[in-house]
Amino acid sequence: MIMKKAVNLKDIARETGYSIKTVSRAINDHPDVNENTRQKILSVAQEYSYYPNLLAKSLRLKKTFTIGYIVPDITNEFYGRVGIVIEKEFRRYGYSLLVSFTEESKENEINSLKLLLAKRVDGIILATVGTTGDFLQEIINRHHIPVVVIDNKAEGIKTNTVLHDNIDGAYVLTKHLLEHGHRKIACVTGPLAETSGKERLEGYKKALMEYGIAIEVQFIKVSNWRVHGGFDATMELMQDMSQKPSAVFYANSQMALGAYKAFKKNNIRIPEDVAVVSFDNLDFTDAIEPPLTTLDSVEEKIGLLASEMLREIILNKDEDRIRERLVKAGLCIRKSCGCN
């Protein structure tokens, strides 16, 4: 057993039975080390509070061991869940996470990217607003910083992405309402400049067309992704009560939460008067009344896939290979759709 003193690599090597070279490579995240070996060594290093000199390590390896994570909305639980997974994954390899919020602003997103460039982060995971493609291209080509985009595609460039399968998810949710017999189904989605807003509308239309139902423009509302966006869009849908829909598909559960407030204000019951389904299985969705029918949670999978993709690029310096991963999700059925 190592004595309680300043612990060095030689002590870790003696305790684990591996060579000093192997211990050093494991602690410094070298790709040649077997993953099981790495975890055994890191476990012993953590147990005996071994902390490498990060400044010296950064200078030697020309790395800062920091990852940037940029998201549009601090209040959206989806981004928090994804971020927790990313931080947990990279912490295993000695990295820390720098988080920045853009408030869905292109200008703020560019400023956040500039800040992370100044901090010399080793990679960036970005939930983009979709319109900063030119600046992202410069970061990738000129500064050679690996970037993985989540939630939306970046306009005008091809980059590594991990995305919810928006079209399939919207199709599954809308089809579920159709199977309940609804034919007047509305859609409340996010900005169409963002692929998540555009593709979720596309999935909604796909389901209606499959059932031979005409697309009615008055049943489609485009808003922002927040609670008040869902509230305002729903109030618009309810203006003409003679033409109101019997069911509504919401493109995220923040919007759906706003819808619940709007329906309550108009004394409209869910699901007796209107059925409701939504993307994003967040913590509150089974706590509201009635519990909200959503897609299954995908945040952990998106966080894992984005982390694995970014780490692979950092280790292999494989900047030219472009990958896109789509994450599908099944239904999480509760009562808001009319199911028992």
Image (spheres, rainbow, N blue to C red):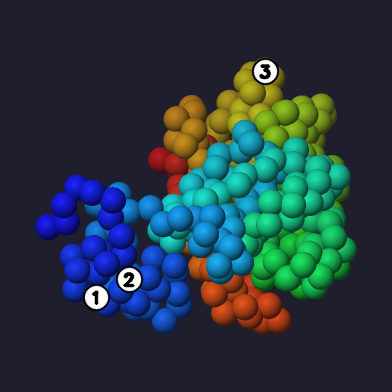
User: Residue 23: which numbered mark, if any?
Assistant: 2
Using a 10 Å C-alpha cutoff, classify the residue at mark 1 as few (fewer than 14 neighbours), some (14 to 19) or many (20 or more).
Answer: some
Q: Earlier in the sequence, mark 3 or mark 2?
A: 2
Mark 3 to mark 2 CA distance (whole Å): 63 Å
Name the amino acid, label 3: Lys
User: Is residue 277 or residue 302 the one in the foreground?
Assistant: 302
Mark 3 to mark 1 CA distance (whole Å): 67 Å
Q: Residue furthest front?
A: 5
Coordinates of residue 128 in the picture (x, y in percent): 74, 53
As displayed, is residue 198 above or below residue 74? below
Q: Earlier in the sequence, mark 3 or mark 1?
A: 1
Mark 1 to mark 2 CA distance (whole Å): 7 Å
Question: Which quarter of the figure has residue 124?
Answer: bottom right
Mark 3, mark 2: which one is toward the viewer? Answer: 2
Using a 10 Å C-alpha cutoff, classify the residue at mark 3 as few (fewer than 14 neighbours), some (14 to 19) or many (20 or more).
Answer: few
Whether tag 1 and tag 2 are in contact, CB under 8 A, the answer is yes
